[in-house]
Image (tube, helix red, strand yellow):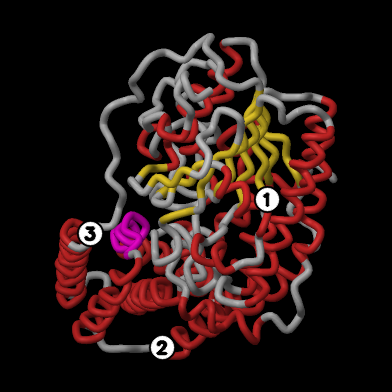
């Protein structure tokens, strides 16, 4: 399987500008406005009026960039839009029709059909299902129609209104223009206060983050296992896993220890989750807050750093996005291939890495389940089929490891980084289906047939790996070691 090329790595970062909701909103707003006014580009006065009016609404853009309006909060976005219509007369309805049309074209056809066809081989007819997924989607991407549309329409309405005023030569010094600016300032202040109140008093589903760092005896030099293999089935929704035909994974779970209330982190984006899993830290510490990584690299120690301190080696086999946070510890794989071949190629690459490098810690990211959820939805049979395929491939990989003698003193960790909600396999805001993930351990040091119902967080992964491999805890790790999963000395 090919490495992710330099072009693919850069392309993935560029795509995130359109995929992530925060950068998409200003990019799309500016693009639509300029496209609508394309016939005035050669007029110098156009750029002056357009630039000044954009500066006037910049505070509104900043508010919408800062506040996500996740889940049901997005319903409240229509109130400011209606208030603007009451304050200023509507004009240039074709501009707003153009914005809606281009938004639906971008999300439903360009993204949901053309992009997925080129990248993972979905059908040219995927738009027939994808439009329903976009309208239901609740995640933090540009595909969240119920959040993006009211934001975009309000921004374009305000920009167009003040552009029209500024493009009139007599309006600059007229008294009514000063009144308009005052009204805009009051409207913006009210929008900020409104947004702050909503997020302060209604935003109450973010997981509680412990303030203390990981404590307990220093595990350095006291390895429990020779190796740990972590297999992350990206985007595997917990209850859909229960419904899927996955006998091998369910057998491992039955023979090992399951954490039934394992919670992901907020926001539940892939790069954020992996960063937290393998540092033991929360986004406020490691600095990765979305898949759009503005400053490359985590700013804390990872489990891979901890292993280097004791002369051990860890590798993470994953897609190009993960390089943005974990850097050279990632063995990248290309994500540009038919989705039916993706996990098969990843498993073949995993075998090669184990045979040639034999790392002490090996993390494998399987991507086909997640990609199916995003492109075709999680409540359809195709999603269950991909979980079943992942099960067969994991069984094959574990069997290969046994044949190579690599499972004698090895712990297996099987989990997802996040779940997925209805819509385009949404994840980020911890909607239904996102928050709790499958998580279980299997191996000679792991208790058999144990079920732990106490709530835990994926930030416990890194310190638990340190405990198993005799490495110091990463310096910003906050998760407790999952000691309940392991046999006591008299049981070993």
| Residue 205 location, quadrant | bottom left
Going from N to C along the chain, the mark reached first, 2 or 1, is 2
Element type where label 1 sits in the image: strand
Residue hosting label 1: 366
Q: Can residue 31 be seen in this view?
A: yes
Give the percent coordinates (x, y) of residue 26.
45, 62
* Residue 201 spot, x, y in % from top left: 16, 60
**CA neighbours of label 2 inside 10 A, class few (<14), some (14 to 19), many (20+):** few
| Residue extent of the magenta highlight | 59-69
Residue 203 appears in which quarter of the rendering? Answer: bottom left
In the foreground, 129 or 62: 129
Disc sitting over residue 199 in the figure: 3
Q: Can you say which quadrant of the picture contains the N terminus?
A: top right
The image shows residue 9, relative to residue 481, as above or below, that is below
Which mark is first along the chain, 1 or 3?
3
Which of the marked residues, 3 or 2, is nearer the chain's N terminus? 2
Q: Residues within 10 Å of mark 3 (few under 14, many from 20)?
A: some
Mark 2 lies on residue? 92
Instruction: Give the residue drawn at x 67%, y 23%.
Output: 360
Q: Report, in whole angstroms, how far the alpha carbon at label 2 lies from the one at label 1.
A: 48 Å
Q: In this view, does 135 lie above or below 268?
A: below
- Magenta stretch contains residue 64: yes
Q: Are marks 2 and 1 in contact (CB under 8 Å)?
A: no
| Residue drawn at x 56%, y 11% as measured from the top left | 309
């Amino acid at each position: 399987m090919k490495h992710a090329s330099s072009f693919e790595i850069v392309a993935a970062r560029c795509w995130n500008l359109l995929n992530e909701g925060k950068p998409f909103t200003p990019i799309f707003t500016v693009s639509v406005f300029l496209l609508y006014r394309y016939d005035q580009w050669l007029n110098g006065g156009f750029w002056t009026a357009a630039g000044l009016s954009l500066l006037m609404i910049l505070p509104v853009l900043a508010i919408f960039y800062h506040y996500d309006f996740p889940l049901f909060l997005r319903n409240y976005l229509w109130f400011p839009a209606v208030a603007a219509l009451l304050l200023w007369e509507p004009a240039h309805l074709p501009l707003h029709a153009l914005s809606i049309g281009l938004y639906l074209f971008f999300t439903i056809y360009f993204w949901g059909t053309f992009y997925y066809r080129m990248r993972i081989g979905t059908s040219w007819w995927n738009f027939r299902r994808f439009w329903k997924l976009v309208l239901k989607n609740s995640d933090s991407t540009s595909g969240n129609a119920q959040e993006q549309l009211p934001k975009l329409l309000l921004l374009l309405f305000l920009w167009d209104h003040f552009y029209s005023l500024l493009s009139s030569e007599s309006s600059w010094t007229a008294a009514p223009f000063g009144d308009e600016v005052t009204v805009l300032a009051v409207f913006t202040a009210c929008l900020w206060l409104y947004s702050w109140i909503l997020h302060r008093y209604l935003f109450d589903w973010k997981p509680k983050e412990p303030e203390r760092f990981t404590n307990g005896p220093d595990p350095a030099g006291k390895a429990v296992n020779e190796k740990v293999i972590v297999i992350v089935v990206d985007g595997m929704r917990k209850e859909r896993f229960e419904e899927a035909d996955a006998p091998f994974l369910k057998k491992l779970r039955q023979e090992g220890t399951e954490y039934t209330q394992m919670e992901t982190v907020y926001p539940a984006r892939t790069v954020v989750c992996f960063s937290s899993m393998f540092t033991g830290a929360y986004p406020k510490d490691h600095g990765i807050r979305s898949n759009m990584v503005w400053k490359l690299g985590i700013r804390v120690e990872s489990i891979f750093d901890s292993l280097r301190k004791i002369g051990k080696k860890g590798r993470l086999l994953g897609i190009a996005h993960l390089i943005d946070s974990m850097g050279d510890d990632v063995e990248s794989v290309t994500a540009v291939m038919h989705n039916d071949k993706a996990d098969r190629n990843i498993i073949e690459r995993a075998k090669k890495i184990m045979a040639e490098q034999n790392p002490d810690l090996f993390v494998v990211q399987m991507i086909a389940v997640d990609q199916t959820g995003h492109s075709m939805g999680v409540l359809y049979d195709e999603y269950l089929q991909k979980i079943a395929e992942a099960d067969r491939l994991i069984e094959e990989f574990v069997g290969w490891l046994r044949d190579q003698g690599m499972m004698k003193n090895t712990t297996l960790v099987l989990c997802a980084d996040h779940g997925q909600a209805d819509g385009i396999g949404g994840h980020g805001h911890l909607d239904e289906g996102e928050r709790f993930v499958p998580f279980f351990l299997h191996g000679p040091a792991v208790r058999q047939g144990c079920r732990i119902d106490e709530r835990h967080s994926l930030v416990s992964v890194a310190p638990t790996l340190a405990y198993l491999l005799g490495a110091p805890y990463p310096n910003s790790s906050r998760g407790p070691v999952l000691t309940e999963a392991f046999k006591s000395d008299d049981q070993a």
